[in-house]
Image: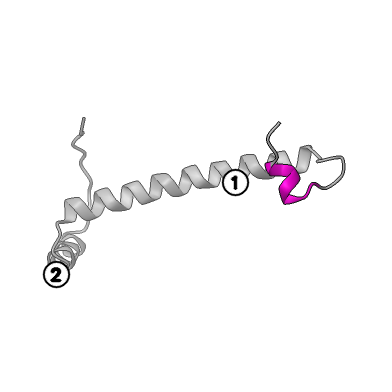
Amino acid sequence: MTKNITFSVDETLLEVARAAAKAEGSSLNEQFRLWLESYARKRQAQRAMEVVEHIRKNYQMTGPKLTRDEMNARR
């Protein structure tokens, strides 16, 4: 499901952005969707890295270091 949203933007900036999108064979709407998707994914990646850092700081791996064969051995 798609939602319509409204933004306030400087008219000159809007026209320049539309011309740039058109020159790329796209629309301003498509460019905005691509940007929004990228922005959302970047935030998800930042959150994932925060979780990884939390785990690294709060949990220690103990025991002997395993070889590749040992890690891949089927039990």
Residue type indicated by callout 1: Met
Residue type indicated by callout 2: Ala
Q: Considering the image in quadrants, where does the N terminus appear?
A: top left
Query: Residue 18's image quarter?
Result: bottom left
| Structure colour scheme | one colour
- Give the farthest residue toward the right: 63
Image height check: is 48 above or below 9?
above
Q: Nearer the viewer, residue 23 or 56?
A: 56
Which residue occupies 75% across, 44% down? 70
Q: Are there few (<14), some (14-19), or many (20+) residues within 10 Å of tag 2? A: few
- Determine which residue is flagged by label 1: 49
Q: Position of residue 72 (x, y in %)?
A: 68, 43
Q: Which of marks 2 and 1 precedes in the sequence?
A: 2
Q: Nearer the viewer, residue 64 or 9?
A: 64
Q: Which mark is residue 66?
A: none
- Helix, strand or loop at disc 1? helix
Residue 11 lies in the magenta-colored region = no
- Determine which residue is flagged by label 2: 23
Alpha carbon separation for disc pair 1 and 2: 37 Å
Left or right of 25 in this view: 39: right
Q: Position of residue 13 (x, y in %)?
A: 21, 63
Image height check: is 11 above or below 6?
below
Query: Residue 24's image quarter?
Result: bottom left
Q: Position of residue 44 (x, y in %)?
A: 48, 42
Boundaries of the magenta span: 66-72
The rendered magenta stretch, by its main secondary structure, is classed as helix
